[in-house]
């Protein structure tokens, strides 16, 4: 129809541009019309969904939305995307199970991959996991991953290393990597000897910097050796089973450091871990009494089956309220746990041989430094924030950067691995091209108006604006995400963003 009617603008009045704009733009391009001569009136999100019970006024509003789109579209201009050569190499930050999986996936596809790990070894948290509910042989799996990474011809591994600078934009990043001497297994920033700084060019970044285990400061943890976290307890289950065979009673406390003030999120894995460890105890010592003190049991999805198995095996689940947490004290060297049973409405007194705490998952230490280096956002809990939870769940808002694993939030090993493969697949959509198109909807400075006040440099969330050799602000079209922050902040009105110019939006408002 574009060809038949010689259309020079197209307006689609239907659903959200966030899901369908790209599809329609491709159609315009294929018909020979510049893809930026396209506009969507968002009748679904902005009208039919919010006015379901008022069809008559909603129809009037729909007409108005179309009228506004028409007014704006009249002023749309064709924009030109610029071709940008892609450096077909990847940088993956973090050598845990997620980072190794992403790196192997890309390297297997033929892309040279730099894997940056700050500690002296690969594996991350998975090195401490002996079993998950669905995978009894975690160590064998992780060791196979490590072995493949160490011997892969296309993976260049940097141990004891950190990214100290990343410049450039999608397709053409350059990072500087600082490497510490082998004597340091977990280097800390500041005051440490540095072996060298290496510069690498890469087209994409995958952040897999992981998380850490919360070390509780309650329930006698740290002062009594019988109080363990689930991961430490798992070590005993697998390395010193005789201790479990000799135990009569094991008590577990859930949600330690999670779902409380300051840390409102659920750590997602600890209910499953508790059930897996409880089942292992029952296998080693069927007579042992295992009691799980919980607020809610979240063995979600298929893992519910194991909760049922645990109940059938005789594991007891006792619910407590967040306002009345269990009390733990020592009496002549023995642990005493008092919990107010919600069903009995009475306190229960338990004397366990082991008290196992389901400690929360926290963001990686020093995550803020990495976020600052890469200019990436963190959420309120300190984990990396994806661009859009539904539409771009593996991407950062900054083009060419992707995320996976615990760095994105608490998740099981299996979920981290799946996400890592997804992030690698997203990265491969860029790496598989020699050239990508950039620019189009980007910020452009009118040098006649710019007074070099630096406001745009301060407000841009992606660190794009710089001052050029003529002393005016300049936005690299390959890096600019077209978010418009700078345009709305510039006191001189010197910035216009392609496809969202002031004149285009003023025409839209006037039509309204
Ligand atoms: C306490 C706890 C208990 C868990 N229990 C279970 C369980 O029972 N069942 C289950 O399925 N899953 C469990 N998990 C989750 C599981 O361990 C992870 O999903 C999985 O191991 C993937 O982790 P990851 O690779 O994303 O991160 P990690 O394993 O944390 O690896 C991240 C790596 O990145 C490195 N790194 C960090 N910052 C930088 C930087 N700036 N530069 C370079 N390198 C960096 C770290 O040194 C580390 O090696 C648990 C996790 C924790 C923390
Ligand atoms: S997974 Fe279970 S124990 Fe862990 S925070 Fe969530 S509800 Fe609490
Ligand atoms: S905010 Fe406007 S005036 Fe200030 S430097 Fe940027 S473009 Fe120039
Ligand atoms: S539109 Fe402005 S604020 Fe947004 S990314 Fe581009 S330069 Fe930065």
Image (cartoon, rainbow, N blue to C red):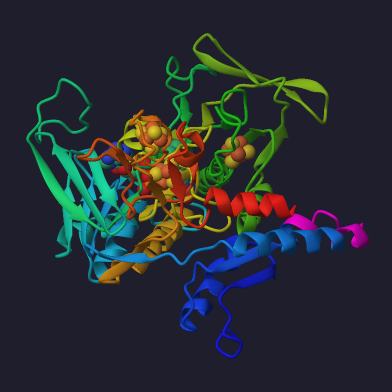
| Residue at the image point whose x is 25% and y is 64% from the top | 86
The image shows residue 141, relative to residue 367, as above or below, that is below
Tell me: 373 left or right of 178.
right
Q: Quadrant of ligand 2?
A: top right
- Front in this rendered view, residue 321 or 343: 321
Numbered-mark total: 0
Quarter that holds the N terminus: bottom right
- Front in this rendered view, residue 367 or 388: 388
Q: Residue furthest left?
A: 195
Tell me: 180 left or right of 162.
left
The residue stretch that appears in magenta: 46-58
Indicate whether residue 55 is drawn in magenta.
yes
- Front in this rendered view, residue 129 or 122: 122
Q: Residue furthest bottom?
A: 4
Q: Is residue 18 visible?
A: yes
Tell me: 163 left or right of 395.
left
Q: Position of residue 309 (x, y in %)?
A: 64, 53
Q: Position of residue 470 (x, y in %)?
A: 22, 39
Q: Residue furthest top?
A: 332
The image shows residue 153, relative to residue 46, as above or below, that is below
Q: Is residue 309 visible?
A: no
Give the quarter of the image for residue 399.
bottom left
Q: Position of residue 400 (x, y in %)?
A: 35, 56
Q: Position of residue 272 (x, y in %)?
A: 56, 46
Indicate whether residue 131 is drawn in magenta.
no
- Front in this rendered view, residue 252 or 366: 366
């Amino acid at each position: 129809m574009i060809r038949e009617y010689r259309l020079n603008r197209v307006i689609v009045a239907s659903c959200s541009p966030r899901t369908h704009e790209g599809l329609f733009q491709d159609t315009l391009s294929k018909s020979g019309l510049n893809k930026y001569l396209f506009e969507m009136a968002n009748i679904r999100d902005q009208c039919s969904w919010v006015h379901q019970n008022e069809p008559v006024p909603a129809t009037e509003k729909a007409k108005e939305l179309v009228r506004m789109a028409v007014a704006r579209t009249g002023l749309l201009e064709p924009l030109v995307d610029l071709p940008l050569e892609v450096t077909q190499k990847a940088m993956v930050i973090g050598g845990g199970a997620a980072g190794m999986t992403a790196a192997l996936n890309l390297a297997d596809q033929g892309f040279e991959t730099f894997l940056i790990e700050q500690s002296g070894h690969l594996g991350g948290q998975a090195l401490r996991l002996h079993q998950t509910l669905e995978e009894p042989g975690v160590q064998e799996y992780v060791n196979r991953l490590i072995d493949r990474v160490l011997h892969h011809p296309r993976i260049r591994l940097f141990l004891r290393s950190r990214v100290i600078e990343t410049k450039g934009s999608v397709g053409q990043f350059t990072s500087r990597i600082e490497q510490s001497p082998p004597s340091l297994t977990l280097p800390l920033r500041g005051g440490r000897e540095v072996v060298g700084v290496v510069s690498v060019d890469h087209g994409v970044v995958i952040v897999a910097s992981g998380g850490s285990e919360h070390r509780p400061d309650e329930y006698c943890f740290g002062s009594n050796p019988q109080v363990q976290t689930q991961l430490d307890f798992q070590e005993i289950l697998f390395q010193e089973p005789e201790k479990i065979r000799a135990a009569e009673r094991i008590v577990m406390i859930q949600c330690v450091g999670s779902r409380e003030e300051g840390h409102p999120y659920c750590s997602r894995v600890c209910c499953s871990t508790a059930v897996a460890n409880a089942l292992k105890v029952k296998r080693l010592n069927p007579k042992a009494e295992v009691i799980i003190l919980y607020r809610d049991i979240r063995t979600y999805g298929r893992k519910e089956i194991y909760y049922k198995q645990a109940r059938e095996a005789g594991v007891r689940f006792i619910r407590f309220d967040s306002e009345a947490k269990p009390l733990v004290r020592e009496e002549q060297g023995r642990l005493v746990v008092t919990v107010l049973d919600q069903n009995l409405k009475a306190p229960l007194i338990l004397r366990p041989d082991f008290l196992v705490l389901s400690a929360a998952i926290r963001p990686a230490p020093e995550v803020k430094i990495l976020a600052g280096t890469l200019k990436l956002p963190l959420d309120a809990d300190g984990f990396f924030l994806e661009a859009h939870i539904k539409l771009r769940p593996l991407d950062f808002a900054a083009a060419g950067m992707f995320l996976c694993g615990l760095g994105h939030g608490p998740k099981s090993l299996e979920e981290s691995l799946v996400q890592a493969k997804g992030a690698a697949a997203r990265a491969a959509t860029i790496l598989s091209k020699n050239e990508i198109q950039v620019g189009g909807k980007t910020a452009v400075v009118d040098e006649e108006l710019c007074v070099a006040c630096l406001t745009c440099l301060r407000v841009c969330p992606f660190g794009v604006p710089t001052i050029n050799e003529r002393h005016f602000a300049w936005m690299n079209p390959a890096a600019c995400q077209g978010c418009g922050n700078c345009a709305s902040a510039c006191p001189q009105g010197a910035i216009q963003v392609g496809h969202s110019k002031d004149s285009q939006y003023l025409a839209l408002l006037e039509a309204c």
